[in-house]
Amino acid sequence: MTLKVLMIGAGGIGAYYAARLARAGHDVVLTARGDHLTALQSQGLQVDYEGEKLDCRLPAVDHAALVQDYRPDDFDLVAVALKSTATGPVMDELGDWLGTGSVPVLSLQNGVDNEPLIADVIGENRVLGGLAVRIGGHIIGPGKVFAEGVAQIVMGAWPQTDGPDDTRLPLLKRLEKAFNEAGIPTTVTDNIRYELWRKLVINNGVNPLSALTSLDTRSLTHHPEFSKIVYGMMAETVEASKADGVNLGQQDLDEMFDLISNFNAIKTSMLVDKEKGRPLELDSIAGAVLRRCSQLGVAAPHTFTVNALLKHQEGQ
């Protein structure tokens, strides 16, 4: 059965998944702005996925046109693939529009604080948590995106499944089947917060340090000194998870370090943002860890130091 999906955000992650779904015959609408939006409307979307070309023509609109031309329940799913720094502003902008419907909203963003922001606007019973796993991607020009990696998705009812009668479960099963058939390796979990925190372990380990040093993930994780800082920041993230009752442990830490150490040598999204002069997701990644360590009364010296140095570089 054809899915109707609204992808809010046509950057590297959102555009790649949108292209995969569209190629499989699903109806996808993208939101974008500026020159990128103009190119999407006039030339279509061009995705370079490790040498494979995924070119498609999709409806692309800005948020004003979205509100004017569509209703929320025109879609089976609204997916948010924006930077986490944009979650609050976009919920402010589209909250009233989303409130006129009942469509579930899936976050595919970095960090562990996006779903609460979305839930504050539309209610927990419409929120799906999600994460993009082992994927790197960014806009390389108007209408053009590069992506790489296995590009998996893990999703689930947020903050957890409300038992067998949870109304989100049929959609999650439908999404899992459709996404996998579209070439997007996808699994559904009944504990999405656990998975989001495991992703944050990796993100906090490499994103801020890569932006500070301009090194890719492989260079960091195989460097004699920087690899120890990566591991230290990951360990501090594991400790911070306890503030949310997620309680990651040593096995999670070692699995995530092994995963990123053996992943492609990629520029992190934070390094790409820094090079392009865009706002960094620092508060959503390092900030999320530091706030929770403060709540717990535990030190996070690696994260504190890298965060402070990067903020100084950025003039914050």
Image (cartoon, grey):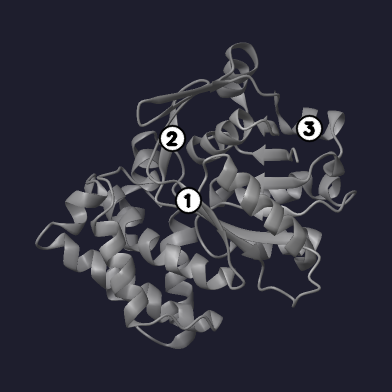
Answer yes or no: is residue 225 visible: yes
Q: Label 2, label 1: how many angstroms apart (C-alpha)?
A: 16 Å
Answer yes or no: is residue 32 visible: no
Q: Residues within 10 Å of mark 1 (few under 14, many from 20)?
A: some
Is the N terminus in the top left, top right, bottom left or bottom right quadrant? top right
Q: Residues within 10 Å of mark 2 (few under 14, many from 20)?
A: many
Q: Residue at x 86, y 30 (%)?
A: 68
Asked whether 275 or 104 is in front, the reply is 104
Q: Is residue 72 left or right of residue 311?
A: right
First in sequence: mark 3 or mark 1? 3
Numbered disc total: 3
Examine the rendered structure and indicate whether residue 54 appears above or below residue 238: above
First in sequence: mark 3 or mark 2? 3
Which residue is tagged 2? 138
Q: Residue at x 85, y 48 (%)?
A: 96
Which residue is tagged 3? 66
The image quarter in which residue 160 lies: bottom right
Which residue extends farthest left? 224
Q: Position of residue 244 (x, y in %)?
A: 55, 80
First in sequence: mark 2 or mark 1? 2
Examine the rendered structure and indicate whether residue 268 appears above or below residue 32: below
At mark 3, the secondary structure is helix
What amino acid is labelled 2 in the image? Answer: His
Q: Position of residue 312 (x, y in %)?
A: 32, 54
Q: Is residue 150 left or right of residue 188?
A: left
Q: Position of residue 82 (x, y in %)?
A: 57, 44
What amino acid is labelled 3 in the image? Answer: Leu
Which residue is tagged 1? 152
Q: Label 3, label 1: how many angstroms apart (C-alpha)?
A: 28 Å
